[in-house]
Image (cartoon, rainbow, N blue to C red):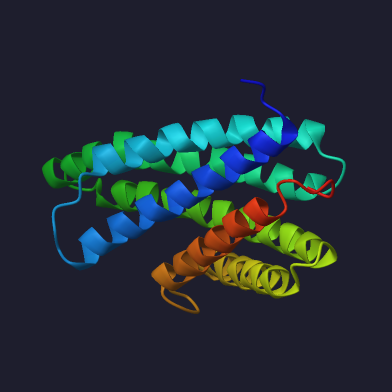
């Protein structure tokens, strides 16, 4: 199979949709207080983020326009890979250490905070990508989708930047900022599907 520009864009959009699905499943299980298979969910996301980084990097080289958008997607994938890796490898170990050794609780909390800092940075980048491709979609006749995607991107950037600058929970609950990033990611994926065959992608 030849990895043409259109196929790379389509695959990237499909992976973004799968990532939205995994986050929705994880959140739903967590809210319902059902045991979350973190290794399965986060491990799967790690694989998807790795593939997305490669695809977005290839698209960045091939694209005629929207280089900023593809760069944002590629780096968001790398940041998210770091974030899920921290969760899989350090959350459990840090929690056990904090429970066994007095005085390690602040370190465990710091690891979690670091993870969320990377998470919010990734959401800012996805918001930026949504803004870039939303504006591009408007130019190709998808005005409603483009406006919605660009607006969702701006909101995701503002809310996640606020969390990073003012610390988690400083201006709004952290899950709200994460949710805006998920919405922006969903619309970004739809937007990429819509413009996959257009030269402006």
Counting from the top left corner in percent of width and height, residue 154 is at: 67, 70
23 left or right, relative to 145: left
The answer to whether residue 125 is above or below residue 162 is: above
Q: Is residue 168 visible?
A: no
181 left or right, relative to 83: right
Q: Residue at coordinates 65% horizontally, 67% vertically from top-left? A: 149
199 left or right, relative to 164: right
Q: Nearer the viewer, residue 137 or 185?
A: 137
Q: Name the residue furthest top.
A: 1
Q: Nearer the viewer, residue 126 or 188?
A: 188
Q: Name the residue furthest bottom.
A: 171
Counting from the top left corner in percent of width and height, residue 129 is at: 69, 55
User: What is the quadrant of residue 79 in the picture?
Assistant: top right
User: What is the quadrant of residue 125 in the picture?
Assistant: bottom right
Q: Residue at coordinates 31% horizontally, 37% vertically from top-left? A: 88
105 left or right, relative to 177: left
The answer to whether residue 60 is above or below residue 199 is: above
Counting from the top left corner in percent of width and height, residue 72 is at: 68, 47
Q: Residue at coordinates 54% horizontally, 70% vertically from top-left? A: 166
Q: Is residue 155 visible?
A: yes
Counting from the top left corner in percent of width and height, residue 2 is at: 67, 21
């Amino acid at each position: 199979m030849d990895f043409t520009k259109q196929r790379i864009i389509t695959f990237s959009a499909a992976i973004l949709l799968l990532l939205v699905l995994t986050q929705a499943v994880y959140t739903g299980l967590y809210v319902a207080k059902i045991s979350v298979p973190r290794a399965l969910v986060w491990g799967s996301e790690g694989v998807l983020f790795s593939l997305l980084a490669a695809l977005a990097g290839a698209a960045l080289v091939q694209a005629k326009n929207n280089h900023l958008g593809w760069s944002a997607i590629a780096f968001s994938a790398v940041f998210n890979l770091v974030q899920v890796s921290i969760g899989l490898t350090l959350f459990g170990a840090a929690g056990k250490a904090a429970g066994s050794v007095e005085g390690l609780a602040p370190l465990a909390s710091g690891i979690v905070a670091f993870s969320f800092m990377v998470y919010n940075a990734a959401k800012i980048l996805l918001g930026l990508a949504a803004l870039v491709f939303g504006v591009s979609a408007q130019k190709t006749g998808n005005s409603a989708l483009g406006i919605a995607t660009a607006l969702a991107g701006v909101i995701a950037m503002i809310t996640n930047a606020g969390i990073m600058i003012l610390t988690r929970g400083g201006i709004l609950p952290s899950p709200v900022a994460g949710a805006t990033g998920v919405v922006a990611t969903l619309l970004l994926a739809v937007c990429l599907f819509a413009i996959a065959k257009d030269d402006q992608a």
